[in-house]
Image (tube, grey):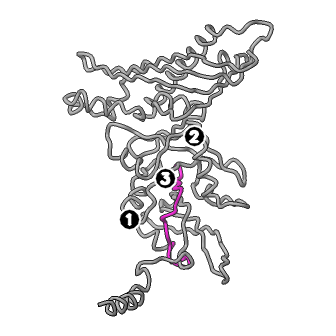
């Protein structure tokens, strides 16, 4: 019996020679960034930023970063065309960013998200971005140390941490496109120099179409507060009073409590009340140093200014017909009969927003 056991142990290593489904990096081309644009002829231009890894022997490799493009009347088949122009097997499982040009995004982003959602090898945490101008111009930026897709990913992670843009991925975008009661906002990037890209704010989306309306970084930070999107802290800077003559202040939000209430009266008029209470730490403030700082007055002034800007932002959301606060979802949940009777795309613009922001300064620094 012992001899039989030893024979089996000797045979097993021969049968288990390795993984049948292994994929060697040297045989694959890793796509780390993808862009889509519409051409003047109405065709779809798809581009990828690909990393090709080639073995030099002795455990050393050469890495090549290249931009490859293809055009077709529809997104279907673009991957095949691009694959035929790249050495090795194309791998999109590391496609960290998907950039859609603004003109194409106005027509709808659904067909371009579906490509990744139905592919079992796709990276469902890819960041979905709308670009000012052509998306290819963003993806074609050349960086000395790191491929541009990685640079953009780091920019997005930084602005997400500062609560300037939402954490949207292929997975979350797909879910919101299927939800008639909520619209999404997406990061809006632009090329500011020949080799620099910045996050300019957020793009407002209705259903799956970019509305052509954006919010700056400052206003998008306030929108994130209205959406109750505070994980750690939110750093902001604004001017209270008339432009050029007002008092500049910067602060970080340490604690946020938001209450959103949707009311429907007997005439089916919809009112959305948003009460925001926030504890903040003042980073800098241009005050008259000859006078003692009046914290109570500063609390009121800052509250009034943020309430004013919050109302401006909700007015912009109505203009863009972008239900970023998910009012429709609350109507469908708590007023199902009304939801069945109305066309939310039309009725949303009649919603009356009543935002109110109350600030409590908990720290002013060592100088004040």
Q: Residues within 10 Å of mark 1 (few under 14, many from 20)?
A: few
CA gap, disc 1 to disc 3? 25 Å
Q: Is residue 345 magenta?
A: no
Q: Residues within 10 Å of mark 3 (few under 14, many from 20)?
A: many
Q: Is residue 217 above or below residue 98?
A: above
Give the x, y percent position of residue 362: 60, 18
Give the x, y percent position of residue 82: 51, 72
Secondary structure under the numbered disc 3 in the rendered image = helix
* Residue with the mark numbered 2: 161
Which is in the foreground here, disc 1 or disc 3? 1
* Residue with the mark numbered 1: 120
Q: Is residue 83 magenta?
A: yes
Q: Earlier in the sequence, mark 1 or mark 3?
A: 3
Q: Is residue 282 above or below residue 137?
A: above
Q: Residues within 10 Å of mark 2 (few under 14, many from 20)?
A: some
Q: Nearer the viewer, residue 254 or 70?
A: 254
Q: Nearer the viewer, residue 220 or 24?
A: 24
Secondary structure under the numbered disc 1 in the rendered image = loop
Give the x, y percent position of residue 258: 44, 24
CA gap, disc 2 to disc 1? 29 Å
Name the quadrant containing residue 1.
Answer: bottom left
Q: Residue at x 25, y 27 (%)?
A: 334
- Please identify the residue farthest to the right as the structure is shown: 290
Q: Residue at x 36, y 24 (%)?
A: 351
* Residue with the mark numbered 3: 104
Name the quadrant containing residue 340.
Answer: top left
Horizontal relation, residue 287 to residue 2: left or right: right
Q: Earlier in the sequence, mark 2 or mark 1?
A: 1
Horizontal relation, residue 267 to residue 225: left or right: left
Region in magenta: 82-104
Give yes or no for contact between labels 2 and 3 (Cβ–Cβ under 8 Å). Answer: no
């Amino acid at each position: 019996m012992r001899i039989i056991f030893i024979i089996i142990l000797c045979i097993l290593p021969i049968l288990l020679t390795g993984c049948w489904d292994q994929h060697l990096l040297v045989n694959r081309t890793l796509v780390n960034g993808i862009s889509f644009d519409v051409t003047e002829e109405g065709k779809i231009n798809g581009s990828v930023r690909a990393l090709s890894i080639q073995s030099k022997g002795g455990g050393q490799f050469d890495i090549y970063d290249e931009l490859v493009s293809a055009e077709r009347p529809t997104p279907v088949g673009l991957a095949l065309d691009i694959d035929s122009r790249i050495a090795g097997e194309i791998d999109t499982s590391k496609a960290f960013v998907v950039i859609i040009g603004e003109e194409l995004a106005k027509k709808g982003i659904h067909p371009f998200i579906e490509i990744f959602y139905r592919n079992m090898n796709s990276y469902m945490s890819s960041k979905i971005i709308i670009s000012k101008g052509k998306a290819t111009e963003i993806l074609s930026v050349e960086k000395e140390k790191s491929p541009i897709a990685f640079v953009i990913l780091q920019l997005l992670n930084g602005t997400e941490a500062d609560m300037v843009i939402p954490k949207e991925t292929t997975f979350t975008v797909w879910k919101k496109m299927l939800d008639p009661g909520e619209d999404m906002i997406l990061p809006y990037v632009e090329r500011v120099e020949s080799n620099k890209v910045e996050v300019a704010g957020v793009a407002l989306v209705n259903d799956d179409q970019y509305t052509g309306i954006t919010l700056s970084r400052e206003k998008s930070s306030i929108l994130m507060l209205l959406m109750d999107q505070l994980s750690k802290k939110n750093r902001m800077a604004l001017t209270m009073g008339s432009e050029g003559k007002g008092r500049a202040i910067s602060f970080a939000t340490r604690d946020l409590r938001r209450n959103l209430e949707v009311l429907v009266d007997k005439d089916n008029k919809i009112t959305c009340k948003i009460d925001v209470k926030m504890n903040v730490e003042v980073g800098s403030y241009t005050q008259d140093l000859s006078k003692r700082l009046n914290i109570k007055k500063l609390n009121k002034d800052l509250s009034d200014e943020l309430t004013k800007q919050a109302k401006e932002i909700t007015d912009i959301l109505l203009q863009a017909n972008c239900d970023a606060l998910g009012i429709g979802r609350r109507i469908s949940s708590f007023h199902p009969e009304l939801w069945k009777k109305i066309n939310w795309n039309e009725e949303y613009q009649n919603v009356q927003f009543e935002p109110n922001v109350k600030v409590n300064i908990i720290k002013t620094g060592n100088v004040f």
